[in-house]
Structure formats: C-alpha cells, structure tokens
Image (tube, rainbow, N blue to C red):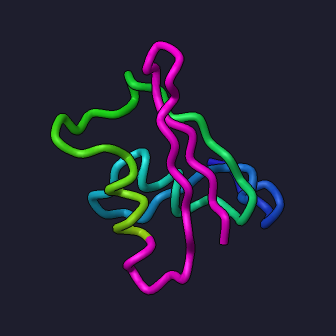
Amino acid sequence: MKKLTAEEKAKFITRPMKRQGYVRTLLMNMKPGDIILLELVEWKWKTKSPSFLCRRVEEDNTGWKFECEKIVQGGSGWIITRTK
C-alpha cells in the first residue's frame, strides 16, 4: 500500500465502484479538446456504436458535447473528440 498525493492520483484513470464500462470511463475522464482513438477490438457492443454512448453521456445533464467519427480507412475504429 502506498499513500498518494493529489498530483499522483491525477495520473490515473479511475472509475466509480459501480458497473461502468471501459469506454464510458474514458469518456467521463475526458477534458474539452481531448481526443481518443477507440479501436474496433475495444468495442464490445454488437448493436450500438460509440456515438450512442457519447449521446448518453451528453444527456446525463453534463453539458458536454462529443464528436464521434468512424475511421473510413479499413474501418478499424472511431475517433472521439470532446468539444465542450
């Protein structure tokens, strides 16, 4: 066990102790202007795309906005940008 400072804690991506997926955790830890590359192998839902999850986070009274774009070359994933 190790005691951490606030600066050391800020280096980690954390999630609340409840059922929350990896991608939603990444979205909730994004700051305006952050961009992530979500590869196809990281996305487990078969019937929904990441844009569905982005819209759900926007609707949770966060006031945040995301731009979700599909990568055309090879269809290997999505690029998600937090705009607001």
Horizontal placement of 34 versus 59: left or right? right
Q: Looking at this rendering, what residue extends furthest in the bottom direction?
A: 61
Residue 5: percent from left, percent from top: 80, 63
Residue 28: percent from left, percent from top: 52, 63
Decide which of 28, 49 is in the foreground and name it. Answer: 49
Instruction: Tell me if residue 63 is in the magenta stretch.
Output: yes
The residue that appears at 43% across and 47% down in the rendered structure is 23
Horizontal placement of 10 versus 52: left or right? right
Q: Looking at this rendering, what residue extends furthest in the top direction?
A: 74
Q: Is 30 above or below relative to 63?
A: above
Q: Is 45 above or below relative to 62?
A: above
The residue that appears at 67% across and 47% down in the rendered structure is 35
Decide which of 69, 64 is in the foreground and name it. Answer: 69
The residue that appears at 34% across and 49% down in the rendered structure is 21
Residue 24: percent from left, percent from top: 42, 55
Q: Looking at this rendering, what residue extends furthest in the front direction?
A: 72
Location of the C terminus by quadrant is bottom right
Decide which of 22, 15 is in the foreground and name it. Answer: 22
Q: Is 68 above or below relative to 41?
A: below
Residue 65: percent from left, percent from top: 56, 70
Report the magenta residues as a range: 58-84
Instruction: Tell me if residue 65 is in the magenta stretch.
Output: yes
User: How many labels were placed on the picture?
Assistant: 0
Horizontal placement of 21 versus 28: left or right? left
| Quarter holding residue 7 | bottom right
